[in-house]
């Protein structure tokens, strides 16, 4: 039963044929068997999960109803959880226990979801492979020599291998969608401002956005309606009513206008990925959609602009880790400066330090206009490209990632790693919603299709994704990982 979607599990729980305690036990058993190999979880909360499950069963007996009541969930270890370690994949926060819950965590608790644990991630969400995690990389359940993608790779691997029913992730440049693509699961980044960032450890504040990683678009709709909404604790969260995303999943796609960015089908795209996406477009055409080419002329500038803006914001956000207030502190500092220097040198990994240095440089006097200001101008051009495209089309579809999961250790050059996000980063720069859904396989590894929508058209993106999943079986494929035992 652990392979079922939350929607299916919810039915079993409501019918009384399954209790949340039984279900939670089943996931904990699976974790006990598989996590040593997969390294998908950093922290497993066995005791508190079983307690929450018991409470969920009691709430149900008293008449409380919600589709996620009693459903076992994993949180990316970037969300603060009251009384449970929140490491952000870093030595800096190895022993950090937040005294409060992130808004996202709180919302899932309110509806009675059961927290199984905290999932592995690239350090401070910087990476595309999980390899920058201080706790070692999570593995891809389709082939454990391969990366699961990043930075929310632990959540994606946990979903693919049935180590939880539903999960959270965050996406600054592709960190929900790319791991979802690599692990053959569904990952949705809502519009910037749709989900509160409060209590979610900041990487690049103008780009970070939380969203669900799960087994179907139907599940993603339920999770998004729980996560979304105005939060007075996050001034960038938007005061717009949360739509009933599940209610519009079955809308017909007849007459839907799909834009295909010419720039997403050029050099660097694997021919297998290209073939799968083109096949998927035929499925949409059969449903009555029309496909036209669009032009995202500045897409090639998205990665360079992002690697100025994101490090700049990260350098400011990460200045709080100074060894004084919380987090790692070096042993026996001789004076204050020595403590700052050594705490940060010892507490942060190489990629995080690289970003802090790039960001500090880009923001420094004399370079601000040349780099940061210029990157912001490019950001506007990228947004304008999308605005223009969306005058003609309803959604934009392309590949999530240029290739399938690569070998652990294969990408040594940081820039090669950065190019992983060539199709996803522009969506963060423009603040748009984007989902990745499974759309094929190449040599036994999953391929993801990327669907981008207009600002706050979460409902349409989920509708377009769900309709594809009604016509295809890609999202139902399971890795053989661990099934032999
Ligand atoms: N891979 C990108 C980076 O390393 C995006 C990460 C993310 O979305 N958090 O910054």
Image (spheres, grey):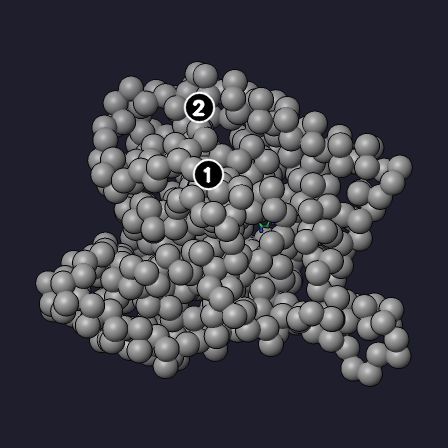
Per the rendering, the mark at residue 259 is: 2
- Tell me which residue sits at (52%, 22%) in the image: 387
Residue 232, given in percent of the width and then of the height, sits at 47, 47
Q: Find out if the beta carbon at label 2 lies less than 8 Å from the nearest ligand 1 atom.
A: no
- The foreground one among 63 and 278 is 63
Residues tagged 2 and 1 counted as in contact (Cβ below 8 A): no
How packed is label 1: few (under 14 Cα within 10 Å), some, or many (20 or more)?
many
- Tell me which residue sits at (56%, 32%) in the image: 430
Residue 132, given in percent of the width and then of the height, sits at 64, 62
Q: Find out if the beta carbon at label 1 lies less than 8 Å from the nearest ligand 1 atom.
A: no
Q: Secondary structure at mark 2?
A: strand
Q: Which residue is the site of mark 1?
A: 238
Q: Could you tell whether 484 is left or right of 190 in the image?
A: left
- The foreground one among 439 and 396 is 396
Residue 178 in sight here: no
Q: Quadrant of the C terminus?
A: bottom left
Per the rendering, the mark at residue 285 is: none
Q: Secondary structure at mark 1?
A: loop
Residue 391, given in percent of the width and then of the height, sits at 45, 16
Q: Is residue 463 above or below residue 326?
A: above
Q: Quadrant of the N terminus?
A: bottom left
Q: Cα distance, mark 2 to mark 1?
A: 27 Å
- Tell me which residue sits at (71%, 64%) in the image: 321
Residue 95, given in percent of the width and then of the height, sits at 60, 76
- Tell me which residue sits at (46%, 64%) in the image: 101
Occupied quadrant, residue 437: top left
Occupied quadrant, residue 147: bottom right
């Amino acid at each position: 039963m652990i392979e079922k979607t939350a929607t299916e599990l919810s039915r079993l729980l409501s019918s009384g044929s399954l209790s949340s305690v039984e279900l939670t036990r089943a996931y904990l058993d699976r974790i006990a068997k598989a996590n040593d190999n997969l390294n998908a979880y950093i922290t497993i909360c066995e005791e508190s999960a079983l307690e929450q499950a018991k409470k969920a069963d009691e709430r149900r007996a008293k008449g409380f109803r919600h589709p996620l009541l009693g459903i076992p969930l994993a949180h990316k270890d970037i969300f603060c959880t009251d009384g449970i370690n929140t490491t952000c994949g870093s030595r800096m926060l190895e022993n950090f226990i937040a005294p409060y819950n992130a808004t996202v965590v709180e919302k899932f608790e309110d509806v009675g979801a059961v927290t199984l644990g905290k999932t592995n991630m690239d350090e401070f969400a910087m990476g595309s492979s999980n390899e920058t995690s201080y706790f070692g990389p999570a593995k891809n359940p389709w082939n454990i020599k391969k990366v699961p993608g990043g930075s929310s790779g632990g959540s994606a691997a946990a979903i693919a291998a049935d180590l939880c029913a539903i999960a959270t992730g965050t996406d600054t440049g592709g960190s929900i969608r790319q791991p979802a693509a690599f692990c053959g699961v569904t990952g949705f980044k809502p519009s910037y401002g749709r989900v509160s960032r409060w209590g979610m450890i900041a990487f690049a504040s103008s780009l970070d956005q939380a969203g669900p990683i799960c087994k179907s678009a139907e599940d993603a709709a339920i999770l998004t309606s729980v996560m979304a909404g105005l939060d007075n604790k996050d001034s960038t969260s938007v005061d717009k009513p949360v739509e009933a995303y599940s209610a519009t999943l079955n809308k017909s796609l007849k007459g839907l206008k799909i834009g295909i960015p010419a720039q997403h089908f050029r050099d660097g795209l694997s021919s297998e990925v290209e073939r799968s996406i083109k096949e998927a477009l035929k499925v949409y055409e059969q449903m009555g959609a029309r496909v036209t080419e669009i032009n995202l002329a500045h897409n090639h500038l998205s990665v360079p602009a992002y690697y100025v803006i994101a490090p700049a914001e990260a350098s400011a956000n990460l200045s709080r880790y100074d060894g004084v207030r919380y987090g790692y502190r070096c042993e026996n500092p001789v004076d204050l400066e020595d403590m700052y220097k050594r705490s940060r040198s010892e507490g942060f990994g190489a990629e995080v330090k690289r970003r802090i240095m790039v960001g500090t440089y880009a923001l420094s006097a004399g370079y601000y206009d040349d780099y940061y200001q210029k990157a912001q101008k490019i950001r506007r051009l990228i947004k304008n490209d999308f605005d223009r495209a969306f005058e003609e089309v309803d959604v934009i579809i392309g590949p999530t990632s240029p290739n399938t999961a690569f070998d652990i250790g294969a990408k040594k050059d940081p820039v090669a790693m950065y190019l992983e996000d060539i199709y996803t980063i522009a969506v963060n720069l423009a603040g748009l919603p984007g989902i990745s859904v499974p759309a094929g396989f190449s040599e036994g590894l999953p391929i993801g299709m990327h669907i981008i929508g207009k600002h706050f058209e979460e409902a349409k993106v989920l509708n377009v994704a769900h309709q594809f999943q009604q016509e295809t079986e890609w999202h139902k494929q399971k890795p053989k990982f661990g099934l032999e035992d």
